[in-house]
Image: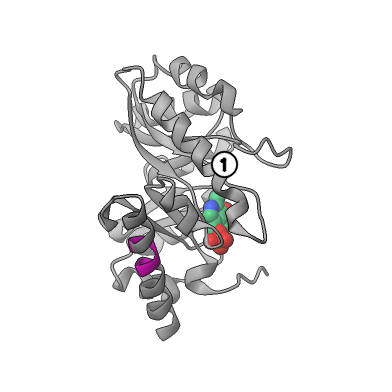
C-alpha cells in the first residue's frame, strides 16, 4: 500500500504550498481522508500515516467502521444526513458537515442532549445553486445560523460546500471566494453556540484552489486511494 503513502505525501505537500500562498502555516488545514467504500486495511494504512480525521458519507458505513476502529479516528459525517439516521451516529461522529435544515439541527441537538454531548456541526451551503445539491442558499445562510441560537447542544463551527464537478478546478475559485466571504460575514455576530473556525471545502480535484482561498478542511478520497469501485 505504498501508493497511499506516496499520495498522502504529495497531497500534504500541495496543501502546504497552497496554505503558504494564502499566508498560512500548513497546520491551518486539516486533511480529512474520505474513506467511503474503502476497506479497513487501507484505512489502517492511512491512520498509520497520522491521518486520523476520516470522512464518511453514509451513517451505516460510518457505524460499521466505527465498530472496528472506534476512537482511533475522528469520524466526520460529510454526506446528506436524514433525521432518522442521526441517532445512530450521534455518539460516534466528532463532526457533522452537512447541516442544512432546522429540522436536522433540532434532531442533532436533541440526540446530543440525550448522550450528554455537544456536537460540532458545519452548515452546508449550496454555493453554486445546483438543483442536484443539498445545502442552504448562500443568501439565507446567516439567518439560518441565527435561527439555531436556541439549540444548546450543537456547536456551529463553520461552513461546508461541495463545489461543482468541473474539468478545470480554476472554475471553482469564485465559489471558494464566496464561501470565504460568507464565513467572514457569519463571524460578524456573536452567538453563544457559534464559533466560526472551519471552512470545509475542496476535494481531490480542486483542494489546492480551495486552500488558496481559505479552506481549513479539505475532504479527499480519490486522491489518496484512487478511483472508488462501487459494488
Ligand atoms: C466523496 C466525497 C468527497 C471526496 O471526493 P473525492 O473526489 O474522491 O476526493 C468529499 N466530500 C464529500 C461530501 C463526498 O461525498
Q: Quadrant of residue 152?
A: top left
Viewer-closest of 154 and 91: 154
- Residue extent of the magenta highlight: 12-16
49 versus 131 height, above or below: below
Magenta region includes residue 64: no
Q: Quadrant of the C terminus?
A: bottom right
Determine which residue is flagged by label 1: 175
Residue at 31% across, 31% down: 118
Quadrant containing ligand 1: bottom right
Viewer-closest of 87 and 171: 171
Give the image location of residue 33, x and y in percent.
Answer: 43, 61
Viewer-closest of 82 and 193: 193
Image label count: 1
Q: Quadrant of residue 27?
A: bottom left
Q: Quadrant of residue 103?
A: top right
Q: Is mark 1 within 8 Å of ligand 1?
A: no
Image position of 204 (left or right of 230): left
Is any atom of residue 38 visible in this view? no
Q: Quadrant of the N terminus?
A: bottom left
Q: Main secondary structure of the magenta part?
A: helix
Amino acid at each position: 500500500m505504498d501508493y497511499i503513502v506516496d499520495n498522502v505525501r504529495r497531497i500534504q505537500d500541495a496543501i502546504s504550498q497552497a496554505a503558504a500562498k494564502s499566508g498560512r502555516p500548513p497546520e491551518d488545514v486539516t486533511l480529512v481522508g474520505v474513506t467511503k467504500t474503502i476497506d479497513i486495511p487501507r484505512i489502517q494504512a492511512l491512520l498509520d500515516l497520522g491521518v486520523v480525521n476520516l470522512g464518511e458519507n453514509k451513517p451505516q458505513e460510518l457505524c460499521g467502521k466505527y465498530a472496528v476502529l472506534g476512537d482511533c479516528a475522528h469520524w466526520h459525517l460529510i454526506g446528506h444526513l436524514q433525521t432518522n439516521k442521526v441517532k445512530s451516529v450521534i455518539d460516534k461522529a466528532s463532526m457533522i458537515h452537512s447541516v442544512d435544515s432546522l429540522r436536522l439541527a433540532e434532531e442533532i441537538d436533541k440526540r446530543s442532549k440525550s448522550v450528554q454531548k455537544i456536537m460540532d456541526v458545519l452548515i452546508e451551503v449550496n454555493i453554486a445553486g445546483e438543483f442536484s445539491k443539498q445545502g442552504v442558499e448562500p443568501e439565507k445562510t446567516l439567518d439560518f445560523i441565527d435561527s439555531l441560537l436556541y439549540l444548546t447542544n450543537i456547536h456551529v463551527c463553520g461552513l461546508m460546500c461541495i463545489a461543482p464537478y468541473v474539468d478545470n478546478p480554476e472554475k471553482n475559485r469564485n465559489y471558494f471566494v464566496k464561501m470565504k466571504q460568507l464565513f467572514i460575514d457569519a463571524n460578524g455576530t456573536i452567538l453563544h453556540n457559534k464559533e466560526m473556525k472551519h471552512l470545509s471545502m475542496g476535494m481531490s480535484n480542486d483542494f489546492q484552489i480551495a486552500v488558496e482561498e481559505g479552506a481549513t478542511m479539505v475532504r479527499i478520497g480519490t486522491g489518496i486511494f484512487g478511483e472508488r469501485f462501487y459494488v
